[in-house]
Amino acid sequence: MNDLANRDYSRSRAVLMGTWKYTDFKEAPAVERSFNRMRNLLKDPVCGQWPEKAIKLFDNRPTLGTTHRELIATFKEAADVLLFYYVGHGIYDHRERLCLTVGDTSIEADFTAATGLPFEAVHDAFRASRATVKIAILDCCYAGHAAEGYGSLSANRLPPVSGTYLLMSSSAFETSWYETEDVADAQTCFTKALVNTVHGGIRGGPAGLTFDHIFGVVVDQLVENGRPEPRRRVEDHAANWVFACNNSPDAPPEPGADPDALYREAYRRETKEGVERLPAIAAMYRAAAAAGHTLSMNRLGQIAEGRVQARMQGIEPGPADGAALQEATQWYVKASEAGDPVGPLHLGQLYEEQYKNQNEALYWYALAARRGNSAAQERLTGLEQRIRLGIDVSRQPGGESAEEPEPAPKAPAAHVTVAGLAAEVQRQRWLADWNGSEPLAIAQCLDVLTDACGGPYGEWAALDEAERDLIVTDFVASLPGKADLARAARRYYEAVGPGNLRDHAAGIRRQAK
């Protein structure tokens, strides 16, 4: 049951109950937010993603109605884990029994038990369940009353992980606190601390967090902030049940975790979560890489280079240097030695762009190409062409030029002439091949011309943006037909002469002045 990535919750049930609209009590929007946060937490991979069918919601019930009966029926469906969570106003009746309130629960002691849900009834519903692990989390005033006489939830005692865990936000005669609406995203203090602890993880903690681990941190946070001290009651082995993964950056991976599952989860987080979670994501990749997972080795190389962080931040990556470059190289070498086709591609890029060693780059590109990597073959072909032509590439696609390129000249305002009108008619006929879309026509001309000039990593890579614009504009001016576009692009490049693209762009610029 400790492998959260593969945990099966089909035989478990989580019942979430919350009330924030009342007749006799003050309404508490913070309760609704806490209720939703707990629901979202259970569906988060950090808790193993409880499926929708395993979660039953008793949200904002206006009256008690059949709630007790529904609780029993739902509790009886659980065979593995049964979790009950309540957030809202708590009150005790004339016999000092805790009652969980619903919309019309009466504040008068004589009517409290008749209009609210006594925890005694919840306890009886727990007794009807055959679940191995039974957990109750109460975030309400006077929650400590739940442990008075009814602390045991009567779990089946089956080793190694079984028993009951009762978690209470306050003692028997203390109120529980919630944030007022002048606080952004106001919530109940106990649930907020609990959910934040699970999401943030516990430094120095194990790979899997039990409620005992979480409880200790939550207590410290709340007491330090002057909030009521939570209480707990544990029986048998429920304290050993793992509730969540430890999201702390320095948390170790779960022993024996499946490397493919670790990689998939780490990659999912990489694409969905913020950059502040990158250390935890990297830890998961490292755990998979330690088991020989080559995709994870490559991701760790990308992290070392700074590419993953830049992608998460939506910015262009800068060049890696020093220890970062060395670390990235080591990860790519490990992947390559394990027979991976992507690792040598990355090594080729590092040697070409960072180490400026074309011979090593050729070796690694060729190795990746032999392993079926088409991107490596494209880079290999382009580099071989540039070496053959003696072209030194000072910039790579996606990088910046060493000097700011001179802006392309603006065409002077044209006077309307018969020749001009005829040329425009001819141009419109040419655009008809692309359904009249000039951007589409130019984009396809650029794509085909790039290939004709050695590909994106061949001679074309030596040009800056302004030079490329000049050459594409010059090529488009000949109105190459769509059906004959590839042949026209080859003829254009042959006419310019291999190795002469930069000089040709300079000539176009001079003519335009």
Image: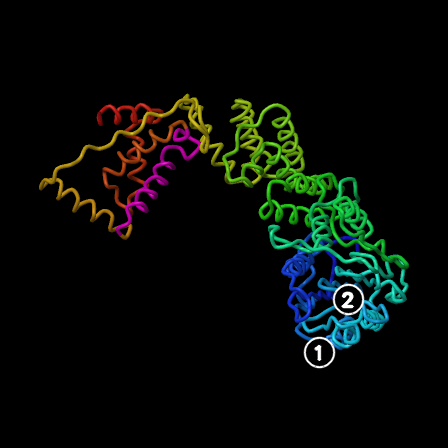
The quarter of the picture where residue 284 lies is top right
Check the image and report above or below for 126 versus 165.
Answer: below
Label 1 is placed on what type of residue? Answer: Gly
Magenta range: 436-461
Check the image and report above or below for 483 versus 366.
Answer: below
For mark 1, what is the residue? 65
Based on the picture, tell me whether residue 451 belongs to the magenta stretch: yes
Count of labels shown? Answer: 2
Q: Judge the density around disc 1: few (<14), some (14-19), many (≥20) Cα neighbours within 10 Å.
A: few
Q: Say whether residue 337 is left or right of residue 160.
A: left
Q: Which SS class for mark 2?
A: strand
Q: Indicate the quadrant containing the C terminus: top left, top right, bottom left or bottom right.
A: top left
Q: Which SS class for mark 1?
A: loop
For mark 2, what is the residue? 91
Mark found first going from the N terminus, 1 or 2: 1
Whether tag 1 and tag 2 are in contact, CB under 8 A, the answer is no
Outermost residue, front direction? 108
The one nearer the camera, 90 or 260, is 90
Outermost residue, left direction? 418
Q: Indicate the quadrant containing the N terminus: top left, top right, bottom left or bottom right.
A: bottom right
| Cα–Cα span, label 1 and label 2 | 19 Å
Q: Residue, x 61% and y 36% (percent of image)? A: 303
Based on the picture, tell me whether residue 417 belongs to the magenta stretch: no
Secondary structure predominantly adopted by residues drawn in magenta: helix
Q: Position of residue 330 (x, y in %)?
A: 65, 30
The one nearer the camera, 493 or 355, is 355
Label 2 is placed on what type of residue? Answer: Ile
Q: Residue, x 64% and y 31% (percent of image)? A: 333
Check the image and report above or below for 366 versus 389.
Answer: below
The one nearer the camera, 243 or 496, is 243
